[in-house]
Amino acid sequence: MGLSDKTYGIQLQTDIGEIGFNHPILPEIRSMSAHPSLLWRAFTSLTFVVIACSFGTVAIAQNTDRPELPHGPLRQTILLGETLVRQTDTHPLTREFVGNSLQCSSCHLDGGQHPQAATFIGVAAAYPAWAPREQKVITLEDRILNCFLRSQNGTRPAAGSEPSVAIAAYITWLSEGTKLKMNAKQSLGPHHITMLTSPKLPASIDRGKQLYADRCQDCHADNGSGTDDGPAVWGDESYNDGAGLAKVPKLASWLKVAMPPDEADLSVQASFDLAAYLNSHPRPHFEPPALSVPHIETPAAQ
Ligand code: HEC
Ligand code: HEC
């Protein structure tokens, strides 16, 4: 999906209050509240909208150019990265590394520009970071490539390859202006998903099943395999059991801010019940690559 053909919800926190409206322009305005360094941009864009509206022109539709994008090859690389994030399972540069029918943007909503749902905004400023899962310090590229292994149930493109560099460039661009602060505790950026604490009642698969039928299955299908309106949430085409969302508290915390897409209004209890229900179904099994290939003796360094 192109940038200009989507209607973005815009919520702006200013010192005179909150301005909210929808317009098919400048998706980055949506994330202003999470990214104060971009406020000037919102301001200039808003001024433009107001002026254009008062003249009753159609000029707004043409204001899709984002002035903050650098020029030259870097600009092209950033834009390629955004395309890959939105078309991960079909794009020729990434599809061979993807083992399901998800895009990065299936979970990193709006291409990672949604301010809460696993946002990419500010993420680059946290790396290199300590990764408790891998028990080592990793780079932003490593973090990206690990999502191919688990959330995309695929294989890692090489670090330094065109898709890896392009996605890293896109995420770094979305992080411009964020204060650099390497994360020594976990490989997560400054606006990572807020983890919910467990609700009063233990998560119930039965309640989750009912909620799923009421609120989710129109888009994700009664057998979880997805429809034209929403991707697979369990089964072969979904994330594998090593992915972050395969853990009930992480999935519940993501659902709370992400689903249903137009109105993320689930209670904490409903989010946990739904997470328990979704993750009670079979999904691909994660095999750590280091263990799935036979150990080969390498000759001593020359
Ligand atoms: C099935 C859902 C899903 C898919 C698909 C997915 N991710 Fe993720 N990803 C997550 C979750 C959940 C996190 C943890 C986010 C958090 O806790 O804030 C995460 C974390 C990340 C992070 C670290 C964010 C941070 O705050 O440091 C990066 C970078 C990332 N993913 C990149 C990607 C890329 C690139 C793709 C596509 C190749 C992708 N992801 C596909 C779910 C997914
Ligand atoms: C109006 C359609 C719609 C409804 C209703 C909806 N979803 Fe989604 N869901 C989507 C879309 C579309 C995406 C992918 C995001 C994107 O492409 O922008 C998604 C993504 C997801 C994902 C992450 C990607 C994946 O497939 O694993 C999960 C999990 C999920 N939805 C669960 C739910 C749950 C649980 C509910 C019910 C509370 C729900 N959704 C309601 C459309 C919907």
Image: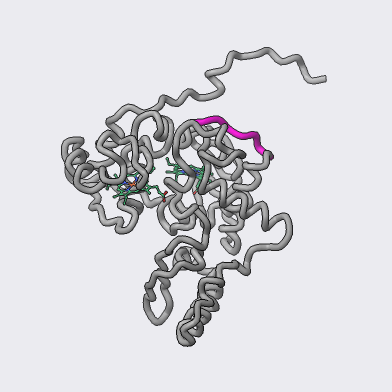
Q: How many marks?
A: 0
In x, y percent, where is residue 74? 70, 55
Task: Say if 236 sits above or below 53 in the image.
Answer: above
Is 157 one of the magenta-colored residues? yes
Task: Say if 92 sits above or below 34 in the image.
Answer: above
The answer to whether one can see residue 185 in this image is no
Closer to us: 197 or 246: 246
Which residue is depicted at the point 67% across and 42% down? 162
In x, y percent, where is residue 107? 42, 46
Give the residues in magenta.
154-160
From this viewpoint, which residue is outermost toward the bottom? 55
Name the side, left or right, on which 116 lies relative to 60: left
The answer to whether one can see residue 205 in this image is yes
Which residue is depicted at the point 27% across and 33% down? 223
Q: Specify the color scheme.
A: one colour
Name the side, left or right, on which 231 lies relative to 83: left
Picture quarter containing residue 16? bottom left
Is 99 one of the magenta-colored residues? no
Which residue is depicted at the point 22% across and 47% down? 270
In x, y percent, where is residue 72? 73, 59
Closer to us: 245 or 66: 66
Quadrant of the drawing holding the C terminus: top right
Which residue is depicted at the point 46% across and 87% down? 54
| Dominant secondary structure of the residues highlighted in magenta in the image | loop
Closer to us: 150 or 122: 150
Picture quarter containing residue 12? bottom left
In x, y percent, where is residue 113? 48, 57
Closer to us: 69 or 36: 69
